[in-house]
Structures are given as structure tokens and as C-alpha cells.
Image: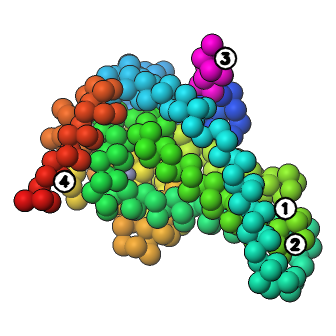
């Protein structure tokens, strides 16, 4: 019974926890930005109809988003809640190992730690996200799981959390590993100066990103940045291109916050180059139109047929 209520609390945290992208204030700020887009692009429907469109929020695809979110909240609670403890333990080990290898060559001041740790963790988190995402697209077995995020035919902010439990576990393990690695390294450089105060720096970067319309990535609001800026930051429309069912757009714009990883790997498409998008997997959409097909039936069937065709 406790797990049931803890799970409900976890679900509510998507709206009530400031660390979540869909925290109510970030949804509100995204709404304000959407209003500006609605005015500038002279959308012919009323603003209310534009934002609270039934075809977006009450579509079959959106229903699958909500189902997966609830399931993942429980998986996080049951399987991943102790991950942070392992992370702290690993950070301690990293710090210890560097001290064994190098002693204490430099000692950064608290202010230096604050600045460099913020930059290093922000870049490392974003790059690791890019690499994991790139791998999910390029390795066929992982793609079968990541497809669940791409099978959405309508996008709303909660589509962010439409990921297969296998991907959820991979993402969480990698992100705790990167956090621990960087934190342990900076603990070593600063005589264990990384603390709650230092973490505010990373929090501020995330807060800015989330306030500036991150929720519009998973939406039909076509917010584009000036073309030069889209080589540095991924705009919401660029992420919508990532969800396009047009083969020409496959495996593009894989970045989280920053676009320069895509530029480096040759996977960047800018908004000016794409006029129209339809979301989803194209012909395969019909294999992903229920919750059970997304979570179980289609991934298992496709994985077996991949293994079988390899054996032939
Ligand atoms: Zn993807
Ligand atoms: Zn997405």
C-alpha cells in the first residue's frame, strides 16, 4: 500500500517538483512563450484552441504517454531509488583513487570550484546524453527500445517521459555515473569542496533552460531560434524535426541542450531547412498504437526477428 501512495507521490512530482521539466512554473513559462509564438506566427485559431487542442492532449498517442509515465514512476521508485546512494559511494571512490594516484597537486578555491564544476558537469551531462541518444539510434537492439519515444504521433510536454523502461534504466545509470565521476574529480581538486552550494550553479543552468520553453520541444508550437543560435542550442522546432517521420530527418538533432555535438557528428538540421513535419514512425505507426505494443509486443517481436535474420 505504501508503494502505491509513494508511486502516486512520484507521479504528482512531475508537476510539483522544481527538478522536473514539467514543473508547473516551467509549463506556465512555456505557455507564455507559446503565446508570443501564437502572436508572431499569426495562428488562425484562438490561443486556447491552439494550446489545449484535443487532438494533442486527448489523442490515443497522448494516452500512451500518460500510461508509460505512470509505469515509469513505479519503476523509478522500486528499481532506481537507491541509485543515488551508489552514486555518492562511487564519487567517494573516484576522489580516493585520484588522491592515491596524484596526491593533491592543485587546490581550487570555492569560487573556482563553483564555476568550473558548473561548466564541467553541464557539458559532461549533455555530452553523455548525446552519446547515449546517438547509440540508441545507431545500434539496432537499442533502437527497438528507443523507438517507443519516436512512436508518438502527437507531442505534448509529457511525451518527454515516454521512454521504454529499459531506456529509463540506462539513462538513469549513465546520468548517476557521470554525476559521480565529475563530482568525485572536483572533490579531489578542491579537498571535498563540492557541496549543496556548488550544486546551485548546475541548478541555475538547468533552471534557465527549463524556463526558456524546454517544454515546447514536445509540442506542436514551432519555436525556432535564429539560424546561427541553432548551431549552439537545440531549439524546440529542431527537436520536433528529430521526431519527424520523414526518412531524410532520421537520426538528426540528437542533442539535449547543446547543438554543437550534432554539428560535430554531422547530425545537425536547422529549422530553416524543414518546412513541414509529421511525427511518428511512418508505416510502423500501426505497430505502436497501444500501450502493450509499445512496451512489450513490438520490441520483443522485432528483437526476435532481428536475431533470427542474423542467424540465417
Ligand atoms: Zn531519438
Ligand atoms: Zn523527444
- Name the residue at 20% across, 46% down: 304
Label 1, label 3: how many angstroms apart (C-alpha)?
Answer: 34 Å
- Which range is magenta? 1-11
Residue 193 rendering spot, x and y as whole percentages: 89, 65
Q: Which residue is mark 2?
A: 190
Residue 8 rendering spot, x and y as whole percentages: 61, 19
| Label 4 lies in ligand 1 vicinity (Cβ under 8 Å) | no
Q: Which residue is mark 3?
A: 2
Of mark 4 and mark 2, the one earlier in the sequence is: 2
Does residue 109 sit above or below 70 in this rendering? below
Viewer-proximal residue among 110 and 98: 98
Q: Quadrant of the N terminus?
A: top right
| Label 3 lies in ligand 2 vicinity (Cβ under 8 Å) | no
Of mark 4 and mark 1, the one earlier in the sequence is: 1
Q: Which residue is mark 4?
A: 307
Q: Does the residue at mark 3 contact the one at mark 4 (Cβ under 8 Å)?
A: no
Question: Which is the main secondary structure of the residues drawn in magenta?
Answer: helix
Q: As drawn, is 69 to the left or to the right of 193?
A: left
Viewer-proximal residue among 256 and 175: 175
Label 4, label 2: how many angstroms apart (C-alpha)?
Answer: 49 Å
Of mark 1 and mark 3, the one earlier in the sequence is: 3
Give the colouring mode of the picture: rainbow
Q: Which residue is mark 1?
A: 194
Amino acid at each position: 500500500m505504501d508503494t502505491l501512495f509513494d508511486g502516486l507521490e512520484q507521479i504528482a512530482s512531475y508537476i510539483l517538483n522544481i527538478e522536473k521539466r514539467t514543473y508547473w512554473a516551467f509549463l506556465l513559462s512555456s505557455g507564455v512563450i507559446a503565446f508570443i509564438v501564437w502572436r508572431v506566427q499569426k495562428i488562425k485559431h484562438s490561443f486556447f484552441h491552439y494550446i489545449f487542442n484535443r487532438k494533442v492532449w486527448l489523442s490515443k498517442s497522448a494516452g500512451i504517454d500518460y500510461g508509460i509515465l505512470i509505469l515509469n514512476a513505479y519503476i523509478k521508485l522500486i528499481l532506481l531509488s537507491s541509485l543515488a546512494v551508489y552514486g555518492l559511494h562511487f564519487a567517494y571512490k573516484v576522489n580516493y583513487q585520484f588522491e592515491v594516484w596524484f596526491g593533491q597537486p592543485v587546490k581550487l578555491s570555492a569560487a573556482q570550484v563553483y564555476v568550473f564544476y558548473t561548466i564541467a558537469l553541464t557539458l559532461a551531462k549533455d555530452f553523455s546524453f548525446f552519446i547515449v541518444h546517438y547509440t540508441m539510434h545507431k545500434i539496432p537492439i537499442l533502437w527497438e527500445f528507443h523507438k517507443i519515444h519516436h512512436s508518438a504521433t502527437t507531442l505534448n510536454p509529457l511525451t518527454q517521459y515516454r521512454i521504454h523502461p529499459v531506456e529509463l534504466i540506462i539513462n538513469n545509470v549513465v546520468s548517476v555515473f557521470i554525476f559521480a565521476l565529475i563530482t568525485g574529480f572536483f572533490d579531489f581538486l578542491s579537498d571535498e569542496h563540492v557541496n549543496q552550494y556548488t550544486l546551485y550553479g548546475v541548478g541555475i543552468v538547468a533552471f534557465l533552460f527549463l524556463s526558456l520553453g524546454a517544454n515546447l520541444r514536445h509540442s506542436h508550437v514551432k519555436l525556432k531560434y535564429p539560424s546561427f543560435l541553432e548551431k549552439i542550442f537545440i531549439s524546440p522546432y529542431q527537436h520536433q524535426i528529430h521526431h519527424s517521420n520523414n526518412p531524410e530527418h532520421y537520426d538528426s538533432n540528437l542533442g539535449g541542450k547543446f547543438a554543437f555535438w550534432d554539428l560535430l557528428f554531422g547530425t545537425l538540421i536547422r529549422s530553416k531547412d524543414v518546412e513541414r513535419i509529421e511525427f511518428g514512425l511512418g508505416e510502423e505507426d500501426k505497430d505502436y498504437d497501444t500501450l502493450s505494443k509499445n512496451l512489450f509486443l513490438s520490441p520483443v517481436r522485432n528483437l526476435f526477428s532481428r536475431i533470427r535474420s542474423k542467424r540465417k
